[in-house]
Image (spheres, coloured by chain):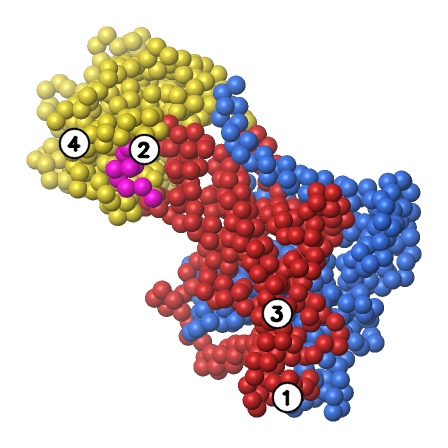
Chain colours: A blue, B red, C yellow
Amino acid sequence: MRRVRKWGPALLLILPSLIALGVFVYGFLGWNIRVSFTSWQGFQPKYDNVGTKNYQDLMNNERFQLDVKHILIFTLVFVGGSLVLGFFMALLLDKGVRGEGFFRAVFLFPMAISFIATAIIWRWLLDNGEGSQTAGLNKLFSMIGLGFLRSDWHKGDSIWAISAIALPAGWALSGYIMSLFLAGLRGVPEELREAARVDGAREHKVYWHVVRPMMLPVLMSAVVILAHISLKTFDLFFAIDPKSPKIDTPALYMWFTTFDGYFYARGATIATLLLFGVALVIVPYIWYSVRSERRK
Amino acid sequence: MTVTSEVARPAAPATDGRNGRIRPRSSPWITTGKYVALFALVLFFLMPVYALVVTALKSPAEVSVTKMWDLPHTFSTASFQVVWPAIRTGLVNSVILAIPASVISAMLGAANGFVLSKWRFPGADFVFPLILFGMFIPYQSILIPLTRTMTSLGMVGGLDGLILTHVIYGLPITTLIFRSYFAGISDELIEASQVDGAGMLRTFFFVALPIAPPAFAVSIIWQFTSAWNDFLFGILLTSTNYNPVTVALNNIAGAQNVPFERAMASALLACLPTLLVYILLGRFFMRGLMAGALKG
Amino acid sequence: MTITTKPSAGIRVEKVTKRYRNGVVAASDIDLEIKPGEFMVLVGPSGCGKSTLLRMIAGLEEVTSGSIRIGDTDVTNHLPQERDIAMVFQSYALYPRMTVAKNMAFGLRMRGTAKADRDRRVAEVADVLGLTHLLNRRPAALSGGQRQRVAMGRAIVRETKVFLMDEPLSNLDAKLRVSMRAQLSLLHKRLGVTTVYVTHDQIEAMTLGQRVAVLRDGLLQQADTPQNLFRNPVNLFVAAFIGSPSMNFVEAIVGRGVATFGGVTVPLPEGSALASADREVVLGIRPTGFGPATGDGVPSLSVVPEIVEDLGDERYVLFEVDAPRVDTEETRAALEARSADDALLIPDERARFTVRLPGDVPVTVGEPLKLAVNPDKLYFFDPDSGDAL
């Protein structure tokens, strides 16, 4: 009984948030899944049960299949690119440079602006005019003698066109990844590096043998965060080139089919699949970090 | 060695070698190479800003996509004047949205974070990951239930539904920020308060809150930026008069055949507030960034 | 200036056990009675359960079974707020955003004391502790010693029946620690409040405690006055733990009224319980149990000093004894060593004794020295159970 008196007030204080999240997160997730089992389309909700028909239909849906390919390609390029760039920037700054504060501020500022703004700016940068109509990055390339880099970007014909969007996405997120890696690199106690140096290791060996093994947790965090952002990304695509089939993704498809086409059931199905995709990376991540925190 | 006045930070980096330790001197080639690479990166990150600013300041006659990189011959604020009426409403709405949303979710986050880190109740370890998951879900998976609920509550159209939405979905990150922060203060402080006769609420108000201002700063700034930059909820839950600035921006600049200079001018205006916050209070913004990475 | 205090209360700990969910037993069936106004020290190596016991008395840890009474009240199920106790923490736990005055007044404020009374009592206590000029400072602006005094002041101001102190001096440097010890003693004499004090330092325990409770692995070994702990340790662990330098041990054989070890034979003291025994024992003798040989029939042994530590008016002489070293769980626990390796820099098989001699006795390394052994100062322990014989 004394125990309840001890933690009763605490539970009460946190209860409103728990209830709110219980409804708005878990309640809604469940509700959405329920809708994915209906045949609801149009204004009036309909809560019948069609089993897994929507899922099967979706798997056979050409547009959806294309979307899945797109998102996989995008994730690959975006995650890979951001990791590489972010790590590279972290390496540059690790040992301390003059003006580090300035550099970090510049690399991170894209995190402070909305993806809509990012999309709008980059839309013109990724212009695909040719010849006298060359503009944007292409124009920049030709101006500095790298004209061969000219590309159609996301308006190109290859299925890889969508990877052009990884440019603005990476531009926005690399700074964050850099911060993660920097914190990880600097979390390696200096004594360890010094011991290695005293033992005769050259700097690159120090990185390889001492620093690198300790970076795994950070790398995992970075991959998980990037992957789940990649699946969720909507604003960026929506504002760069909304109805283009070349950069259609499940997230975009869900939006248009639900709020333009009123195919609620189908939208819910896509959304549920997105949820599972994200949960696949996030649930182990949360479980792992909570557990390792408890072990400390 | 004292624990009484620590201000906790998430993931503090270890020494970075600039405190007098002797570090191996890199060859001048490497150092120069570093700075060259860093400046190239700065150019990469600022290049879109350049194009943005330069275009926004050109007179409409001079604006041309192909001449994006040229400096203005004459400076003109015509573009700003054209877009200002539409953007202004958006800016006002965003302010009305972001300030209450960030303050309220910070306060709730403080209470939650305190309870979860310092005042155990049965199931606390179980509840925390559940809350955390809410931070990562793809919003597509709750959009349909959200719109239905908000409509039936009569909270669609104005900003009230949007504020509520941001408060609730912001709970996980603010809870996380405060929980990490309070975890860093010693348990003995809370115990001393209990021995002195204070229960949970009084300990929260008299002992925990007074040392929480840094966490409030991080939470509020992070949530402000988050709410300001959101697009998805904004476009779903508000009507034209109440559109936040991201939606207004998309309305002005989102279509394909839009005057280039108007898009750039409106993007610039829309980004200014969060950029200002970032420049002036970037420290706190960065801590919010790192908090979201957990500590896997 | 006097400080008004209520009559103090005794504490009775009855069969208290603390078991954690993962099975670890931090305290096992502890029975301890602390008289009103007594200064009781809980001492033992880390992990022995002394802090846990203190925290259970405070109400900061739950009691798995057993009961705790403060005065006439059974407080076992009471929250810390509901017990009439004050506590000084190892890290002082001062509220960082409050001034010294507010820190000290906090407990009174929480209990609804009127402002005028609060201010008066804070001023009184601050005066006694020499904190008056610091009342408006924040903890960050204080030195370690000052913070410690504020922590004490915060406890005293509340005029509770019981003080609990969890290693309050261990964060101070050595000199400050010694002077604070004396002041703590004076304070206790003056206030007369029942105090339970936890430390891992047995010297602190012996100097401060009216009675000392020695704990090990959650079990109470012996609770007694410092003198009795020193003179009549109830087992090998207590004997090894109390006293600095620690007691010397060697395996010996007792038979026919004498004890034999390493080529030395010593008669048992008169009326010893072992007079007719014939068994193996662990023999213990404190560094002060030897003296220079006077040659008048007192049993003596000839030793070759290996190391002489000269401290001015006394000397510590270390010599080897021709017998294996006593290395048991108890002796290791007393040294807080987890394995045989932990205790020695260079592993060694032979026993080594430390003797304390007056500074004017001529001692040279390598030259044989004759020492007298006082049979009354011998201790005998069972080699298996560690109990005194």
Position of A10 with respect to A249 (left or right) is left
- What residue is drawn where x is 23% and y is 29%? C116
Residue B240 lies in the magenta stretch: no
Residue A77, position as x, y percentages in the image: 71, 68
Q: Does mark 3 fall on the same chain as mark 4?
A: no
Q: Which residue is mark 2?
A: C106
Residue B236, position as x, y percentages in the image: 72, 55
How far apart marks 1 and 2 lie (CA) works out to 70 Å
- What residue is drawn where x is 11% and y is 40%? C312
Magenta range is: C97-106
Which kind of residue does numbered mark 1 sit on?
Answer: Glu
Proximity of marks 1 and 2: CB atoms separated by less than 8 Å:
no
Instruction: Give the vertical position of C253 relative to B238 (above or below).
Output: above
Q: Quadrant of residue B254?
A: bottom right
Image depth: mark 3 or mark 2 in front: 3
Q: Does mark 2 fall on the same chain as mark 1?
A: no
**Label 1: how many residues lie within 10 Å, few (<14), some (14-19) or many (20+)?**
some
**N-term-proximal mark, 1 vs 3:** 1
Q: Which residue is mark 3?
A: B85
> Dot 1: what SS?
loop
Which kind of residue does numbered mark 4 sit on?
Answer: Val
How far apart marks 4 and 2 lie (CA) works out to 19 Å
Image depth: mark 4 or mark 3 in front: 3
Label 1 resides on the chain identified as B
Q: Which residue is mark 1?
A: B62
Position of C385 with respect to B42 (left or right) is left
Q: Quadrant of residue B226?
A: bottom right
